[in-house]
Amino acid sequence: MFGSTAELTAGDAAPDFSLPGSDGKTYKLSDYRDKQAVVLAWFPKAFTPGCTTECKAMASGGRKLKRFDAAYFTVSVDRPEKNQEFAASVGADYPILSDPGGEVARSYGVTGPVQKWASRWTFYIGIDGTILYIDKHVKPSTHADDVAAKLAELGVPERK
């Protein structure tokens, strides 16, 4: 069942997750405590125009994002099989995570009582597991550039 919990804000602890990726691996937030940041870019629905634009931008801008000591993912409530097909279609060189039951989406507040798809919000999570910033005004076509700029603004170091 979809629904929302209390809205998260910067400074809150990011809810942990364990979600399947489009590459067949399982990803957990707690596995990234060695990274300076984790970026979770929620998107509404695979194979829709805005989501396709956003995920293609993240793939084409991957070089900019990989400069930082950060892990980044896009994530939706689509089934893993659908996100595997979607990742291939957009040329994603990063994992697209799936939350088909919506539990993680609810914990991040990106779904509502009626809305069954995720809001297009991006969460920036620090090395200590706290939320550094939430972007609720994502521009799909420039998302990779915007994420890279925000990582720099947040002081996330570049990889050595």
Image (cartoon, rainbow, N blue to C red):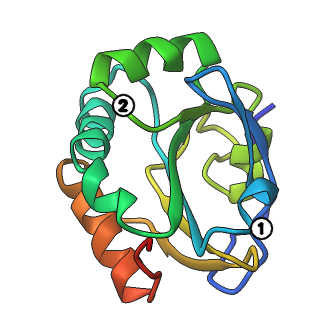
Quadrant of the drawing holding the N terminus: top right
Residue 116 quadrant: top right
**Where residue 135 appears, x then y in whole percent?**
43, 69
- Residue that protrudes farthest toward the left in the picture: 141
Picture residue at 23% right of the left edge, 36% below the top: 53
Q: Which mark is residue 80?
A: none
Q: Which residue is mark 2?
A: 92
SS type, badge 1: loop
Residue 44 vs residue 110: left or right? left
**Where residue 117 appears, x then y in whole percent?**
55, 35
* 159 versus 107 height, above or below: below
**Where residue 146 appears, x then y in whole percent?**
27, 67
Q: Which residue is mark 1?
A: 6
* 113 versus 24 height, above or below: below
Residue 125 quadrant: bottom right
The residue type indicated by label 1 comes to: Ala
**Where residue 102 appears, x then y in whole percent?**
73, 35
Q: Answer few, some or many: residues within 10 Å of disc 1's Cα (few below 14, many 20 plus, some between 14 and 19).
A: few
- Nearest the viewer among 78 and 4 is 78
- Residue that protrudes farthest toward the front in the picture: 160
Quadrant of the drawing holding the C terminus: bottom left
Q: Nearer the viewer, mark 1 or mark 2?
A: 2
SS type, badge 2: loop
Q: Earlier in the sequence, mark 1 or mark 2?
A: 1
Picture residue at 47% right of the left edge, 57% below the top: 121
Q: CA separation, marks 1 and 2? A: 32 Å
Residue 147 vs residue 108: left or right? left
Callout 1 touching callout 2 (CB < 8 Å): no
Picture residue at 48% right of the left edge, 60% below the top: 122
The residue type indicated by label 2 comes to: Ala
Picture residue at 63% right of the left edge, 68% below the top: 35
- Nearest the viewer among 109 and 156 is 156
